[in-house]
Image (tube, grey):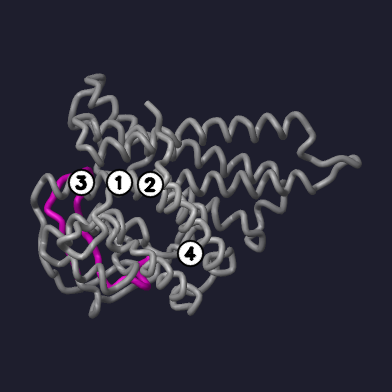
Amino acid sequence: MRFALTAEQQDLREVVHELMERLCPPAVVRSAPDAPAIDALDRGLVELGAPGLLLSERSGGLGLDENYLVPLLTESGWAAAPLPVLETVGVASALFEAAGLAGRLLTGGMVCAADPTGAGPVRFAGRATLLVRGGWGGSGPVELVDLSDARREPVPAVDPAANLCRIGGGTVLGVVDDPVVVELAWQRGVLGAAAQLIGLSRRMLEMTVEYVGSRTQFGVPVGSFQAVKHQLASALLQVEFAAPAVARAGFSVAVGDPDRARDVALAKALASAAAQLAARTAIQCHGAIGYTTEYDLHLYAKRAWALAADWGSAAWHRTRIAEHLGLAPTGTLPVH
């Protein structure tokens, strides 16, 4: 099967990539959550129609499917966008539409955070005005929470741009316990995390190739050394092996394939492993400068480390794949 983007999907990818290049350089990723530059990025995504990408047309959305979600989130991952794009566009849409609250997503921008474990802490909670709580593994119920009057306690995080907080209080707007809707929201969350990891991996490898092409040792570029070439080629191979699995998972969810849960788990397992290898390779090929917080590489490596563990780690999803294949007894998965 061929998983190349259609012309329309490719156009979307290019438009989102251009937006991220223009409005989300590394300086914006480093910004405070309330920085005007992040507001501008939020508005840019709203102007593209991102909040309504997966909402039906009758609810005021674009009525598109997961084949479009993958390129959008791949590019937002490439930029390490400091906004809950995955949560708002991918996870919240089915839940809020099922609860008759789709309008809350169309009028607020990238404002919905997600806490699938129901125990916190929550990524991008500093900006969020809405929260999806619960639904781990595709099981409900899921609460839709208004955070207008909620308490936010900042929590130290591997990825400082994620603005991690513990949430206290908030007003429950509704509860979704339809198993079909909850499972769809979970699968979109896992799929979206995998897509963002592919984008992050490509960004880190792009930065590394540029660096080793300009950094010299013994009078020649570091990138000319065979050991460096081999490491980068191995990382790229793993990333580009994972990318079609992510595309396949998007297709499976879009058409309601009976094996979509397996395909989504495979996508996340491969993308998590690929991103961790890409981060490790990028840091090693950069040498000592790769470890410094002043250098931009850490923005993407830390996002990759955090996201690789979110929505189920590679090991968690490998166990889930084994269950689907009948190679492991059901009920062996940990809570997260």
Between marks 1 and 4 in the image, the one whose residue lies nearer the viewer: 1
**C-alpha distance separating marks 1 and 4:** 26 Å
- Residue at x-position 34% and y-position 67%: 110
- Residue extending furthest toward the right: 219
- Examine the rendering and report whether any part of residue 47 can be seen: yes
**Amino acid type at mark 2:** Val
Between marks 3 and 2 in the image, the one whose residue lies nearer the viewer: 2
Count neighbours of disc 4 (C-alpha within 10 A) and say few if under 14, some if 14 to 19, many if 20 or more: many
Classify 249 as above or below 307.
above
Check disc 1 and report the residue beneath it: 66
Q: Nearer the viewer, residue 235 or 18?
A: 18
**C-alpha distance separating marks 3 and 2:** 15 Å
**Amino acid type at mark 1:** Glu
The magenta stretch spans which residues? Answer: 124-145
Residue 324 rendering spot, x and y as whole percentages: 23, 26
Count neighbours of disc 2 (C-alpha within 10 A) and say few if under 14, some if 14 to 19, many if 20 or more: many
Earlier in the chain: of badge 3 and badge 2, it is 2
- Residue at x-position 50% and y-position 63%: 19
Label ID, residue 184: 3
- Residue at x-position 13% and y-position 50%: 140
Q: Is residue 155 magenta?
A: no
